[in-house]
């Protein structure tokens, strides 16, 4: 009686597929309501408060005020020279060292791995950037290409943004932050028009689907939506630039993006031939002297397969697969049991 049977290489198949889902909390595809603000988040008087660095955005006001509220995404503003927010220190030598400089330095380090590299958008190198950072829990392993649809509206001016993954047939620039696509005017991955530099200020920005990050070009945005002109004041209250982008997102009332994850499956094709597994491995099947407990099982045994165990080379049980119903087995029957492990 065989107890263990080793799988052949042809019995094991690896398969990987992409699973898409709605990104926002409660399986929402389109986010139409936005809430931000708290004592700390909007404390612009304190140069080191969280509001100087980023604004968390929630789907509902209840989520915003809850201690366990789920953040959908965050908004930040960065300036390479530190303009737009008050310096951390008012003493000599503290000029330019502020939250906005920290944000700009952080994201260029993430993208380029270089603290001296500046963001350039189709030939235009602005001094600053806007950033939308989608909460990691929302995007799973990344954003689905072509699913981004973000509407910005302020003072009657509207801009519909998407990535250009469909326009460029999926090609991308590879960075330290993963794939980089252009942020363009259009919808569902298709650019409107044929020119990337759709404004005098260059292209609208970059999308990093593997990290859930969108970096926007203020020089391009302000040519369409005048309210998005960043303030470079270094007054105590700062420029409140992240809030300007929040107001434009709030006015557009439409932010669509899908999450994507890869699920790998290992298939084990367990082949049970007519000569194998015709006797039970249950100890009650035999007597203490090793003879069969029931003589009727001697010549024409009939058993039922209910479980398949997967073992390593040391015969240690690693996984158990349960059949949906017992499978009758004797010397006249063969079976093929397919086991699937997802991870």
Image (cartoon, rainbow, N blue to C red):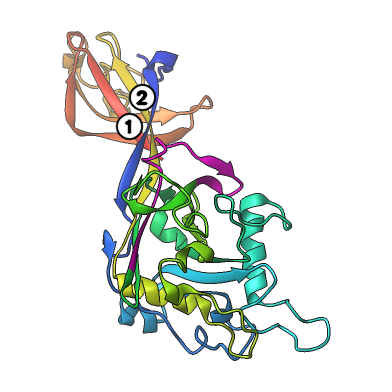
Q: Is residue 133 left or right of residue 323?
A: right
Callouts 1 and 2 close, C-beta under 8 Å: yes
* Residue 73 within the segment the image draws in magenta: no
- Considering only vertical position in the picture, is 161 above or below 12? below
**What is the tally of numbered marks visible in this picture?**
2
Write the residue at 30% across / 77% down. Answer: 60
Q: Position of residue 312 (x, y in %)?
A: 49, 28
Residue 340: mark in rendering: 1
Q: Is residue 283 left or right of residue 208?
A: left
Q: Considering only order in the chain, which callout, 2 or 1, is on the residue closer to the N terminus?
A: 2
Write the residue at 45% across / 29% down. Answer: 311
Q: Position of residue 159 (x, y in %)?
A: 35, 63
Write the residue at 32% across / 20% down. Answer: 270
Q: Could you tell me which quadrant the N terminus lies in? A: top left
Of 15 and 176, nearer the camera is 176
Q: Position of residue 95 (x, y in %)?
A: 76, 81
* Residue 171 within the segment the image draws in magenta: yes
Q: Position of residue 298 (x, y in %)?
A: 22, 11
Write the residue at 53% across / 75% down. Answer: 230
> Where does the magenta region start and end?
158-180
Spatial CA distance of label 1 from label 2 is 7 Å
What residue does disc 2 label? 268
Residue 334 figure quarter: top left
Q: Is residue 331 left or right of residue 76?
A: left
**Other-residue count near label 2 (Cα within 10 Å), few / some / many at <14 / 14–19 / ≥20:** many
Q: Secondary structure at mark 1?
A: strand
């Amino acid at each position: 009686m065989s107890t263990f049977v080793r799988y052949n290489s042809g019995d094991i198949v690896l398969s990987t597929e992409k699973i898409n889902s709605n990104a926002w909390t409660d399986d929402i595809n389109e986010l139409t309501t936005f809430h931000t603000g708290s004592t700390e988040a909007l404390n612009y008087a304190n140069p080191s408060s969280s509001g100087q660095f980023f604004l968390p955005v929630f789907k509902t006001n209840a989520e915003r005020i809850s201690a366990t509220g789920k953040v959908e995404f965050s908004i930040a503003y960065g300036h390479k020279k530190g303009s737009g927010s008050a310096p951390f220190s008012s003493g000599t030598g503290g000029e330019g060292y502020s939250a906005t400089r920290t944000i700009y330095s952080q994201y260029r380090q993430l993208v380029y791995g270089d603290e001296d590299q500046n963001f350039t958008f189709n030939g235009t190198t602005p001094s600053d950037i806007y950033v939308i950072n989608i909460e990691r829990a929302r995007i799973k392993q990344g954003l689905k290409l072509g699913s981004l649809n973000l509407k910005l509206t302020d003072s009657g001016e509207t801009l519909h943004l998407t990535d250009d993954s469909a326009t460029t047939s999926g090609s991308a620039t590879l960075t330290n932050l993963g794939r980089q696509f252009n942020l363009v005017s259009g919808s569902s991955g298709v650019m409107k028009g044929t020119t990337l530099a759709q404004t005098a200020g260059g292209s609208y920005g970059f999308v990093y689907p593997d990290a859930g990050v969108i970096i926007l070009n203020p020089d391009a945005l302000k040519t369409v939506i005048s309210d998005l002109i960043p303030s470079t004041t270094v007054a105590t209250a700062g420029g409140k630039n992240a809030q300007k982008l929040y107001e434009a997102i709030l006015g557009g009332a439409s932010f669509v993006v899908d999450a994507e994850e890869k699920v790998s499956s290992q298939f084990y094709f367990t082949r049970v031939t007519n000569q194998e597994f015709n006797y039970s491995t249950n100890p009650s099947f035999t007597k203490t002297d090793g003879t069969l407990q029931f003589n009727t099982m001697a010549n024409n045994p009939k058993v039922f397969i209910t479980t398949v165990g997967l073992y390593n080379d040391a015969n240690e049980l690693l996984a158990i697969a349960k059949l949906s119903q017992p499978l009758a087995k004797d010397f006249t029957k063969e079976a093929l049991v397919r086991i699937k492990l997802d991870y």
